[in-house]
Image: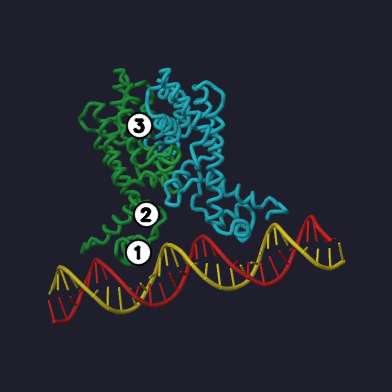
Chain colours: A cyan, B green, C yellow, D red
DNA sequence: GTTTTGTCTGACAAAAATGTCAAACTAATC
DNA sequence: GATTAGTTTGACATTTTTGTCAGACAAAAC
């Protein structure tokens, strides 16, 4: 298949990603996606057979894409603190490009069809877990299960972005003020993790 | 309206809440809800006119319910540390009863129709912000914007539950092991916040 | 230049979900 | 016990979304 590549298949996937992750239209129909891509809906079915398959494919690729970015940062040859900084920067860049991606993923993760195709703990994660344990022995971070350290890192980083609209209203913050808040967090997160 | 209260209206709402928040069927149809409640779908329309209105009503009540619980804990006459502990316990209890509520709320908060009907910062929140500032002056917590302190609290508490299925797989954890992890977090979160 | 093969489209069919209405039912009220 | 008014239902209509299929189109192969 796909011998005479016209780019339509990729175009459809990219458009779907934009609509879901950048524009936050979680309930977009195949027609919406086709329209946005400037093709007919029939073509979407031609390449992906069904909506579910398109969904799954977009989700899986997004998942893989994220994992690759995580792995690149977490297995880099850098001191621990630099790794964390790199991770935070990478994460913020990702959110800036795709503000709704996190929210979308959370939804999927909690849906009943969720199933990742992993065999085992990734090598990069294994390296990072080693790092964490070493830092604990050095005393730069508190002793805890590595999984909990990672949960803390992700939590402090991701959650504020997931609840941004709510917190903006709760604390009566403008966009600029919220950005400033996020900016402050960068240093603060490091301090909290490396106590 | 509702002069001859048969309990059907409340039954439908309660059933919807159970399906959404406890069973995690985010895309349940009105038919699904009617079936689960043991009534006809027509009756759902009789009481709520449209699916959207039912959704909105269930969401708003859930939001209000949460806010009330938060307020009760945050404005209690207790030392700061006890308040935090109460908050954490309340949150875990809530999640145990409705495992998918958080995820549902995040979705809604990030949808484009989201709009809370609040006038101003709630009195309870104002009290808690005062508490936070006092603790900062006493030196029991690091100096930061109160909003950031609250974000930290929520993040550390809520995020692990949102990504539970993913982390379970990533770290190859059983349900029991994950529960143990969560249990450890209780003390840890307090330590991280009160350094 | 004609055949072949992959790409794309319009028209149609099917399915899924929501909404409406007249009429049946039932518990209060008179 | 007849009337009234709120409640419930089944049948029907509409809307929305998805899926299919025969055929048009275009580029490569012969």
Q: Label 3: how many residues lie within 10 Å, few (<14), some (14-19) or many (20+)?
A: many
Q: Which of marks 1 and 3 is nearer the N terminus?
A: 1
**Marks 1 and 2: CB-CB under 8 Å?**
no
Cα–Cα gap, marks 1 and 3: 40 Å
Q: Earlier in the sequence, mark 2 or mark 3?
A: 2
Q: Quadrant of residue B123?
A: top left
Q: Nearer the viewer, residue A3 or A155?
A: A3
Q: In which quarter of the image is residue B151?
A: top left
Q: Do labels 1 and 2 share a chain?
A: yes
Kindly identify the residue that appears in the image at 33 percent across and 21 percent down: B195
Which chain does tag 1 point to?
A: B
Which chain does tag 2 point to?
A: B
Kindly identify the residue that appears in the image at 54 percent across and 57 percent down: A51
- Pair 2/3: label in front: 3
Say if A31 sits above or below C2 in the image. Answer: above
Q: Nearer the viewer, residue C18 or A55?
A: A55
In this figure, which residue is indicated by the disc labeled 1? B45
Q: What element carries label 1?
A: helix
Say if D19 sits above or below B113 in the image. Answer: below
Which chain does tag 3 point to?
A: B
User: What number is the disc on residue B153?
Assistant: 3
Say if A12 sits above or below A93 in the image. Answer: below
Q: How many marks?
A: 3
Report the side of B8 relative to A61 (left or right): left
Q: Quadrant of residue C18?
A: bottom left
Cα–Cα gap, marks 2 and 3: 29 Å
Expressed as whole percent of the image width and height from the top left, the position of residue B82 reads: 24, 29
In this figure, which residue is indicated by the disc labeled 2? B55
Q: Is mark 3 on a helix, strand or loop?
A: helix
Expressed as whole percent of the image width and height from the top left, the position of residue A2 reads: 69, 54
Cα–Cα gap, marks 1 and 2: 12 Å
Expressed as whole percent of the image width and height from the top left, the position of residue A97 reads: 56, 38
């Amino acid at each position: 298949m796909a011998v005479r590549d016209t780019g339509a298949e990729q175009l459809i996937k990219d458009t779907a990603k934009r609509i879901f992750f950048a524009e936050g239209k979680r309930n977009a129909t195949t027609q919406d996606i086709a329209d946005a891509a400037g093709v007919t809906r029939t073509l979407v079915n031609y390449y992906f057979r069904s909506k579910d398959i398109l969904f799954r494919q977009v989700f899986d690729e997004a998942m893989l894409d994220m994992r690759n970015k995580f792995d690149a940062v977490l297995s880099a040859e850098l001191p621990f603190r630099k790794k964390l900084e790199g991770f935070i920067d990478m994460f913020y860049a990702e959110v800036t490009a795709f503000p709704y991606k996190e929210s979308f993923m959370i939804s999927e993760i909690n849906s009943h069809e969720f199933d990742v195709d992993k065999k085992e703990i990734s090598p990069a994660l294994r390296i990072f877990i080693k790092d964490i344990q070493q830092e604990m022995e050095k005393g730069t971070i508190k002793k805890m299960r590595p999984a909990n350290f990672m949960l803390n890192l992700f939590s402090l980083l991701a959650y504020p972005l997931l609840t941004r609209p709510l917190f903006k209203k709760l604390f009566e913050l403008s966009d600029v003020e919220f950005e400033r808040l996020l900016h402050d967090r960068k240093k603060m997160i490091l301090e909290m993790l490396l106590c």
